[in-house]
Image (cartoon, rainbow, N blue to C red):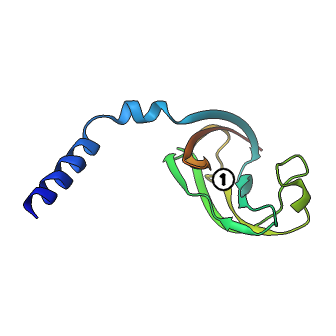
Amino acid sequence: MKSVIAVLTLILSLALLPSYASAEEGIQRKTVEKTVFAGKRTRLGEQWHIGQDCKTIDIPAHRIIEKPKNGRIEIVQEGVFPGPKSTRAHCSKVKAKGAVTYYTAKPGYEGRDRAVLRMEIGDGVLGDLTIDIRVVK
């Protein structure tokens, strides 16, 4: 029993060592630009995991890595329709559950903002999405 605990402790210790940089290398990165109206909650994007039968398999996990400094990001579960150019174009008229990202600028703010999200983008694949936001009146 002591040897099992020692092995588990060693594995956990190795997992917590400063290997964060090497783990970061396996994360795909993408940057998008969005323009939004000041003070208006704006849909920035959506993500879903839908089977060939158009039914929700699961909701992809999301995490805010960098919060915007001049607004708020919300990630909510709601109905989505896959787009006509997606891998599930045949499901474009079937509402399924997905994760939808919204941004709302602070009242009166006009200018640039930025957020970084980390999400599942495939089986065992993570992606960091940098959203450069331009807030206009």
| Residue 112 in the image, given as x and y percentages of width and height | 64, 35
Residue at position x 75%, y 46% from top? 36
**Along the line of sight, the residue nearer the viewer: 101 or 13:** 13
**Along the line of sight, the residue nearer the viewer: 112 or 57:** 57
Q: Quadrant of residue 33?
A: top right
Residue at position x 60%, y 54% from top? 73
Q: Is residue 29 placed above or below 38 in the rendered structure?
A: above
Left or right, 124 with respect to 43, comes to left
Secondary structure, mark 1, is strand
Left or right, 69 with respect to 105, comes to left
Residue at position x 75%, y 62% from top? 51
**Along the line of sight, the residue nearer the viewer: 134 or 13:** 13
Residue at position x 65%, y 33% from top? 31
Provide the residue designation for mark 1: 103
Position of the N terminus, as image quadrant, is bottom left
Q: Quadrant of residue 41?
A: bottom right
**Crowd class of label 1 (few under 14; some 14 to 19; many from 20; radius 10 Å):** many
The answer to whether one can see residue 136 in this image is no
Position of the C terminus, as image quadrant, is top right
Q: Amino acid at mark 1?
A: Tyr
| Residue 4 in the image, given as x and y percentages of width and height | 16, 59
| Residue 133 in the image, given as x and y percentages of width and height | 67, 39
Q: Residue furthest left?
A: 2
| Residue 69 in the image, given as x and y percentages of width and height | 52, 44
Left or right, 112 with respect to 137, comes to left
The answer to whether one can see residue 19 in this image is yes
In this rendering, the count of numbered labels is 1
Q: Is residue 71 placed above or below 5 in the rendered structure?
A: above
